[in-house]
Image: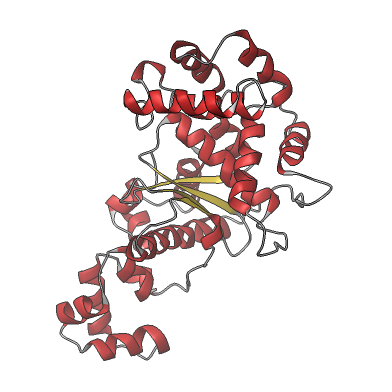
Amino acid sequence: MIILARESRKLRQSELAKKIGLAQGTISKIEKHGIDVSPEIIQKISSVLNYGLTFFEQPGVPVPMVLSYRRRINVAKSIITRIDAVVNVRRIVIQRLLSEMDISFSMVPVIECGKKNSPTDIARQLRKLWNITDGPIPNLTSLLERKKIVLLPVDFGTEYVLSRSILTDANHPIIAFNRMLLGDQLRFTLAYELGHLVMHTFCKVNSSRDIRHEANLFAIEFLMPQKVIINDLKKNDPEILWLGELKQKWGTSMQSLLYRYNDLGIINEGRKNRILTSFSRHGIKRREPKEFDVPLDAPKLLSEIVADYKKLYKLSDAEFIQKTGLTSDDISSMFM
């Protein structure tokens, strides 16, 4: 837990060692080999890292699931290390709450992707399995939370990392997402991570497969099913105002809609690229017009779990904070 605490606070071993008056080698031994540490040292570590003593009393190790990230290709290792630590700290807290409340969630459906099942096929199967009516999904956040997938907003400290899906020790799925995301970005990101959970997390995946591409294909069909959206796309050319109207209806970005025009063969590659060039020229590619923004559907499940936990154990806010070992800011950051 000391490693997670230190990395989540963006401190190197040498920095922690200096702050508590120990050699870096000693900190390394403590972290690697779990050697006995005096209560005085633990108190100093707790004070420097701003975690309560109870935080260091619980078991917990990081879960390395790098493939479940949605991010840019080139992101500094230090950024990923810190995000890994923050997400894992919160995972450990969440799994403790669920365990002590004896809550057991059913697993997400597992559908193997391969020759018989493309990501597009799987997206259609899941919509049917979950009884999702044809057309746009009004509130994807609410849908996933009804399926007991915990959605966790996190300050990633960068716009280049969008999300990470992870499991508790009991295989409860958690999707951690960048709290900077806009409404349409969040919807696509959640659909992308859902694709990972359904197709990859519980299945053997050959290293030659491009699972990021598969998750993208799943998300596209899950949010914009071909048999329905094609009629909307054919009504008008992909001009900015029309794309904006479609964005508000389908809850997906203008750019993703433009790509849908192209992959369904309504416009060719050259036309798509010319429109993207126009987007860049008008600054739309980086930030689409605010008048077309999609409402941000904030998650509620985690706050309900925390409220139920505090009620079950008759804890005040202060007592809950003390029991988790987190700070009030840490707790607040777990909700929108």
Could you say which is closer to the camera, residue 216 or residue 89? 216
Could you say which is closer to the camera, residue 284 or residue 125? 284
Q: Is residue 203 left or right of 328 when viewed as pictured?
A: right
- Can residue 297 be spotted in the picture? no
**In the image, residue 57 above or below residue 222:** below
Who's the residue at 36% across and 29% down the image?
Answer: 280
Q: Which corner quadrant of the image does residue 26 belong to?
A: bottom left
Q: Is residue 133 left or right of 97 when viewed as pictured?
A: right
Q: Which corner quadrant of the image does residue 335 belong to?
A: top left
Q: Residue furthest front?
A: 270
Q: Which corner quadrant of the image does residue 43 belong to?
A: bottom left
**In the image, residue 221 above or below residue 6:** above
Who's the residue at 25% across and 68% down the image?
Answer: 49
Could you say which is closer to the camera, residue 44 or residue 126? 126
Who's the residue at 54% across and 51% down the image?
Answer: 174
**In the image, residue 312 above or below residue 239:** below
**Residue 42: horizontal and vertical position, in percent?**
27, 80
**Image quarter of the C terminus:** top left
